Image: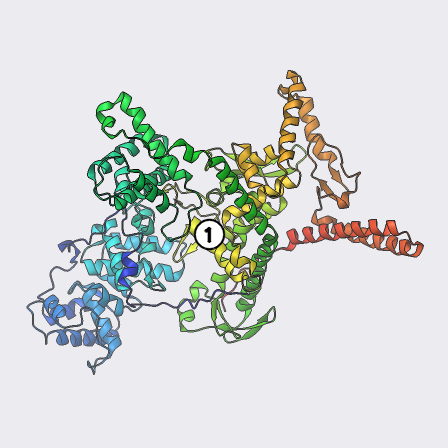
Amino acid sequence: MAELASTGKVRRTRPVDPSVVDGSRYRRGRITPEAPAPSPAALPYGDLSRASEQQIVDLAMRVWPGQPPALAARRHDLRGLLRLLARFDGDTWQQRWDGCGYADGGLPRRGLEPLPHARLINAFRMLISLRVIRPRLAAVNRTHAGGFAQMFRHAQNDPALGAYFTAVADTSANALAKSTALFDIARALAVFGIPLADLTPAGLLAYSWQCRDSGAGLYRSGNRSSFSARLAWAVLAETGHFPPGTPPTINAAGQRGQLTVTELVDQYPIANRDVRQLLIDYLTRRELGMDYSTMRNLARMLAGLFWLKIEHLLPGIAELKIPDHVYEQWREAIRLREDGRERLSVDPILLAVRSFYLDLHTWSASEPDRWARWVAPCPISGRELAGSARRDRKRVERSQERTRSRQPLLPILVAHVEGRLTHHRQLLAAATAAQAGQRFTVEGRDYERVWTDYDQQWKANDPIRARDLATGKIINVRLVEDACFWDWALVEVLRHTGCRIEEALELTQLSIRRYLRPNGETIGLLVVAPSKTERERIIPMSGELFAVIAAIIRRHQDATASVPILPRYDNNERLHTDPMPFLFSRRHGHARQVLGQHQAVAMLARRCRDLSATHPEFGQSRFTPHDFRRLFATDLVNNGLPIHIGAALLGHLDLNTTRGYVAVFDEDLVRHYQTFLANRRALRPVEEYRPATDDEWREFETHFDKRKVELGNCGRPYGTGCAHEHACLRCPMLHVPPDALPRLDVIEADLHDRRARAETEQWLGEIEGIDITLDHLRRKRTQTIRLTAGPTIPISPPHEP
């Protein structure tokens, strides 16, 4: 079983590859980073740049009073550093500091005896806090020690800074996140030489980029340093320090959001400025009838895949009339993607270009001054699109073949994510109960509880780490267990709802509704927000889906007492939604954020990669979120659900779309069923389409009472009788509740007695029938036990060692 290893160590001041940082997608954000200018208002004790050694020492004694031994040590440390700086040239302490050679790397660890390095750092922090010198970022980071933020706050005597410290303390973040948020603001104010009132979003973003570029972020992943000041940004935004409309997170501030039409076209270096302006005008006119993702895709096809390639093939072209040989070269060029792979379909590109030419023809009749000069023969003839229906059928066939290849792999994937979650929950429980250095065994694997100075320092975070004795890897057990839970929750929700990935990630606590019947029975409903078709739909929740949703909510309640209200970044529309209690939100670093589509795809890819070691089929047949939607549709229709009801559950406006999703489904059956529905409706009297009366509605509700049988509840639809001659154990519509498990044991024992008698009497037909019934009984029991005692059962909260 593959595991995620993490030491949880803090890594500081490592250099970062500039090419990695410069290529970040956060570079073109809505807020331009801009370091603020130093302000005289930041000097709480006036200008001390030319103060004498004695004046600075006396001031430090007044600002940080204490017992005589502590004051004597502080006085000694401060005098030692000031005398060290006095050896260098300069009229001010700042000039001496800048010229001493330590400004970019902090203070040296050797060569300053008899003053120890730790004592020198303490004196350096006092000079920063008193604003005697203004350090650079690297110096503060390398001389960072616990308590600097509190020392800085005490020296500034700034009410706004005190309010910020209080706001950070009131958050639900862990101790390490709070400490980092305090240090980030103290370091930013010290480096920029400003008070908190002058710290703007642009300034804090500039500070975070400086940390990221220099590798001074407290946490790193590979060659990339993380954004600093994440929690600090969130607190300043929530408390109103930042102006209204400021993005809620520092990552959101670094994202560009929606591009204008001009910016979409200018992503592609079109040489001819007149054609560039034509594309901008054309897309601007088309913009009103499109959402942003569609507009972005149209700009990519017209500007990037069409005209930019035409200019490469025929440099200097200035009109839309394209020579035949250039057009043939372009058709050949678009067959391949940028990575060299063959493009599955070029029809969307051809349709976009043909529509572009035909629109110009049409618009030139009403606005000749604006469009007539660009009218030209369309290079794409109608004959080239004549085979689109055949190509669509081939696309559907590829989709159905993909579904057929993944259908037998789905149980393996489900068992894998459930097994990982169960294993790591047991590991978390065992590691929590173990003492430091104690060895324990989970499912035949030996582990050792790790407890280092790092764990001791941040024990308020409740770090739980264990070493796998077989591999030597140190596992952050809590983080891995959390990752396993969300892997399992994502797979379960996708396969039980058939939702698109954006619809699944947009599920909130408000999406859960219930219908309470007069007899007290509750029916769970899941409201899916409108997505691709802009149509809201309601999905009745099965027992499995209800258990998964309940486990997700319980996970949030255990962590934060409620489902956190957070904004979500819509990757398609490049916008942040209003804060909502999204179900798929988890902690990322110091803050919580909603799971993104790319993260979901990566999670599934990791699970398939793990399984490929034991099941090579996963190496060629990896799952994507949309595969679960196709499998859901196939399972519904092939198990007898009318296809038009399946289309409603999937949110399809066209029945043919659902038919394209369903694999191994007889097309003739669909056609005959549609004909049957049309004929039956034509024969029905008009009166049957009137609203239901009270008696009819009462009869409908009574139907659910009549479905209750000895072993549970029958799921047959309204208005239908029993199609299996009351052979309930063999019927897939029977749902057995947990309290009926003892009755199953009694029935199984009776079946074994009957089988023994049948063997004695040589009733071979009876033996075969009993074996079939026993097989169905065991399946019912396994399904009920799985829903009752599966991985959705939470473990007790861990205790500190």
Image position of 397 with respect to 72: above or below? above
Q: Nearer the viewer, residue 649 or 594?
A: 649
273 is higher (above) or lower (below) than 423: above
Identify the image quadrant of residue 311: top left
Does residue 513 appear in this view?
no
Residue 92 appears at what percent x and percent y? Answer: 8, 67
Q: Position of residue 688 (x, y in %)?
A: 65, 19
Q: Nearer the viewer, residue 250 or 135?
A: 250
In the rendered structure, which amino acid carries the disc numbered 1?
Val
Question: Residue 183: where, in percent of width, then height?
Answer: 29, 61
Task: Identify the residue shown where x is 70% and y is 49%.
Answer: 738
Which of 619 and 529 lies nearest the eye of the viewer?
619
Q: Report whether 1 appears left or right of 598.
A: right
- Asked where in the image residue 172 lies, by quadrant, the reply is bottom left
Classify mark 1: residues with Cα within 10 Å, few (<14), some (14-19) or many (20+): some
| Nearer to us in this view, 689 or 683 | 683
- Residue 437 at least partly seen: yes
Q: Secondary structure at mark 1?
A: helix
Q: Which residue is mark 1?
A: 601
